[in-house]
Structures are given as C-alpha cells and as structure tokens.
Image (tube, rainbow, N blue to C red):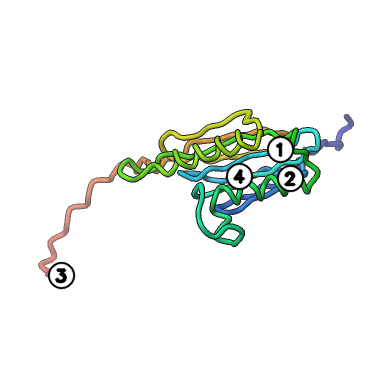
Amino acid sequence: MRAGDQQHAPVERRVHVGQGEHHVTSDPTVVLSTVLGSCVALCLRDPVAGVGGMNHFLLPEGAGEGTDAGRRYGAYAMELLINELLKAGGRRERLEAKLFGGGRMFDTLKDVGASNADFAERFMADEGIPVVSSSLRGAGGRRVQYWPVSGRARQRAVTDAVTPPPAAPAPRPVDTGALELF
C-alpha cells in the first residue's frame, strides 16, 4: 500500500429496536440493538439470502392483534418479523433464530420474563425454526446487539447498581448568628 492510500472499513449504522418494533435489513453495515428486561427479542436471519432482522415484544399474547397495540405482543411480533424476512428474500426452511431476554425483573411480582421466554421457545418449535443460540431468563436486563447479515450477536448485562463517588466530608457550618426557617 502506498502512502496516502488507506483502506476504510464501512461505518456501522446502528438501528435501535424498541418495544413493539422490528427491523429487517440486508445491509451488512447495520447493527440492530435493543435493551431488554422481561421483554424478549427474536433475532432471525436467512444466512444464504443475507437478510435478517430483530423484533422486541413486551408480552406473549393479548388483545389488539394487527393494530399498533398488537405489536407489543409476541404472537403478532413473531409473525410480522417472519413475514418481513420472507418478503425480503428469505426462505422459511433456511431461517435460524437467536432469542434474548425474558429476565426476572422483580422478585415480588409474577415472572413475566419467564412467560415471554416460554412463549418464544414454544413459538419457534411450533414454526420449525431452529434456535441456534439463546440467552433467556435469569435476573435483570441485558443490552443486545445483532448484526443480521452475519448473524453475530453480543449481549451485556444491564444493572441499576451505580457506585456513587466517595462522599466528601460535610463542611462545618459557620455560625453567623442568622436563623433560616424552612
């Protein structure tokens, strides 16, 4: 390589997939990302067609199928993502899935995350789509990144614990004789 010639890697384009959303692409520079607690994300691709996508659903099933509210439910979100991949050139028999999320967020409430995880696994089995990897259930949330063309996925635990900086000693009050009422 001559001086001045530089090879530049393509810049990644990040697309966030929020609750009730999905995104499908064949662009190798796109990385899909989401943050999950009890929600579940399906990462789905056809490795031969080079197309993939991600969804993010809030609850396994509910009213409002086919409406904007319906997008929050697993049954609708799964069908929507599969159909979009097929429209983009994917073939059902080549689809492979990765599942993330379904964390238990609160000890005192019903474990919605486990219900979401159970639903997602059952749905993939019923559809005959192999789950090549998954990270479901457990405690707390996770941040997920997915490169739909290559199938690469990465997750990181999300914690609420923030270590506060060490507290400085409180300054000693100066006695000026004034009285402040509050």
The reply to whether discs 2 and 3 touch (Cβ–Cβ < 8 Å) is no
Circle number at residue 163 = none
Q: CA distance from mark 2 to mark 4?
A: 18 Å
Marks 1, 4: nearer the viewer = 1
Q: Position of residue 97 (x, y in %)?
A: 64, 35
Marks 3, 1: nearer the viewer = 1
Asked where in the image residue 66 lies, by quadrant, the reply is bottom right
Q: Position of residue 146 (x, y in %)?
A: 64, 39
Between 2 and 85, the one lying in front of the other is 85
Asked where in the image residue 133 lies, by quadrant, the reply is top right
Circle number at residue 85 = 2
The reply to whether discs 3 and 1 touch (Cβ–Cβ < 8 Å) is no
Upstream in sequence: badge 2 or badge 4: 4
Between 171 and 51, the one lying in front of the other is 51
The reply to whether discs 1 and 2 touch (Cβ–Cβ < 8 Å) is yes
Around disc 3, counting alpha carbons within 10 Å, would you say few (fewer than 14), some (14 to 19), or many (20 or more)? few
Q: Position of residue 80 (x, y in %)?
A: 66, 50
Q: CA distance from mark 2 to mark 3?
A: 67 Å
Question: Which residue appears at 71% of the width and 38% of the height?
Answer: 45
* Residue type of the residue flagged with mark 3: Glu
Upstream in sequence: badge 3 or badge 4: 4
Q: Which residue is label 4 attached to?
A: 33
* Residue type of the residue flagged with mark 2: Leu
Q: Give the left or right position of residue 107, taking residue 94 as reference.
A: left
